[in-house]
Image: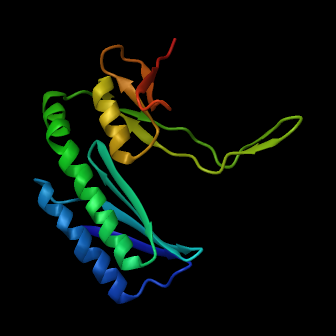
Amino acid sequence: MKYNIRGQHILVTDALRDYVEKKLSRLEKYFEEPFTSETNVTLSVTKGKHAIEVTIPLTSVMLRAEEKSEDMYASIDLVVDKLERQIRKHKTKINSKFRKESGIRTFFKEEGSSVRVADEEEEFELVRTKQFMLKPMDVEEAILHMNMVGHSFFMFANSVTSEVNVVYRRNDGKYGLIEQT
């Protein structure tokens, strides 16, 4: 596994780097093939809280977790535990769906940098643009992916309708689906 470990408002020492690599290498046992992508790790300290954010891009799925605590080593332990829970919870179901489906992936790309939209009362600034591939999947699998990455919404290509859809978590804890018309 390759690591891209960087610090924000913290110096990433060799001891800290070794600890992160040792702890994250525990995740390799859950996968049949070794990771070919680079694991991104961001360590930061803000207002006395030690935070770690880990993103592991895998084929057709993105593992992501973040944790904050009073101690960086404790945050590292907590984030690895969170990633292990995500993997155990979703691995069997997602793997079985991936084996059954062998659709063509659609690459969704939106170009652009910082864009300002002027309004009479306020100004909106787009500060981040993400690019990702849309994989055909059903609504249930999209909800699993959304929960795995810890977001409140997830965009996907609906394998039934071939349209771009969005699933989202409602305030009542249930899920909603936005369909294209």
Can the viewer see residue 151? yes
Indicate the quadrant containing the N terminus: top left, top right, bottom left or bottom right.
bottom left
Q: Is residue 108 above or below residue 148?
A: above
Residue furthest to the top: 181
Examine the image and state in which quarter residue 5 appears: bottom left
The number of discs equals 0
In the image: residue 85, left or right of residue 155: left
Colour convention of the picture: rainbow
> Residue 59: x, y in percent?
26, 46
In the image: residue 108, left or right of residue 74: right
> Residue 48: x, y in percent?
55, 77
Residue furthest to the right: 120
In the image: residue 73, left or right of residue 131: left
> Residue 150: x, y in percent?
40, 46
> Residue 110: x, y in percent?
55, 38
Examine the image and state in which quarter residue 140 appears: top left
Examine the image and state in which quarter residue 99 appears: top left
Can the viewer see residue 105? no
Instruction: Name the residue at 81% across, 43% down.
Output: 123
Instruction: Name the residue at 44% across, 24% down.
Output: 176
Instruction: Name the residue at 49% across, 16% down.
Output: 180
- Which is more toward the observer, 24 or 106? 24
